[in-house]
Image (tube, rainbow, N blue to C red):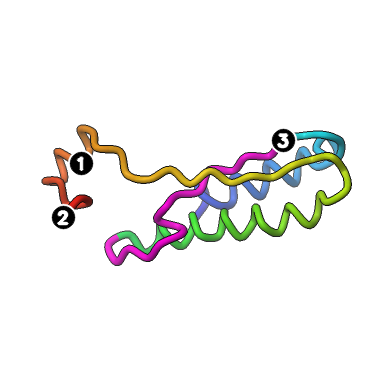
């Protein structure tokens, strides 16, 4: 929660005055925040909150020239998946 969600909230809050004109805000969510996945509840919940934050910030910055777009990367078939026995792809 501290890293995934609160770091985004605090950073945007602290930079708010600099973000009011033609800035680009791009928080990093996850496909696990878009689609349910029973094995990573806390992670998915915080990433889902990032997507909600982005949607709400779009309204906050409407008309200022600042845009907000959340990125939602999916699984990457790499060494972490191999260590996990390929569980994410089963």
Q: Position of residue 42 (x, y in %)?
A: 40, 61
User: Main SS type for the magenta part?
Assistant: loop
- The residue that disc 3 covers is 24
- The residue that disc 1 covers is 81
For marks 2 and 1, give the one nearer the viewer: 2
52 is higher (above) or lower (below) than 23: below
Q: Residue at the location (37% across, 65% down)? A: 36
The segment highlighted magenta reads 24-39
**Sequence-earlier tag: 3 or 2:** 3
Q: Residue at the location (43% across, 43% down)? A: 73
- The residue that disc 2 covers is 90
Tags 2 and 1 touching, CB below 8 Å: no
Q: Residue furthest left?
A: 85
Tags 3 and 1 touching, CB below 8 Å: no
Q: Would you call the spot at circle 1 few (<14 residues within 10 Å), some (14-19), or many (20 or more)? A: some
80 is higher (above) or lower (below) than 72: above
Magenta stretch containing residue 2, yes or no?
no
Mark 3: secondary structure: strand
What label does residue 10 carry, if any?
Answer: none
**Sequence-earlier tag: 2 or 1:** 1
Mark 1: secondary structure: helix
Q: CA distance from mark 3 to mark 2?
A: 37 Å
């Amino acid at each position: 929660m501290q890293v995934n969600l609160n770091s985004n909230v605090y950073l945007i809050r602290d930079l708010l005055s600099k973000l009011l004109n033609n800035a680009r805000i791009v928080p990093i969510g996850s496909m696990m925040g878009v689609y349910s996945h029973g094995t990573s509840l806390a992670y998915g919940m915080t990433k889902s909150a990032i997507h909600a934050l982005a949607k709400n910030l779009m309204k906050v910055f409407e008309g200022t020239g600042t845009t907000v777009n959340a990125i939602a990367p999916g699984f990457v078939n790499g060494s972490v998946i191999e260590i996990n026995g390929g569980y994410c792809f089963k």
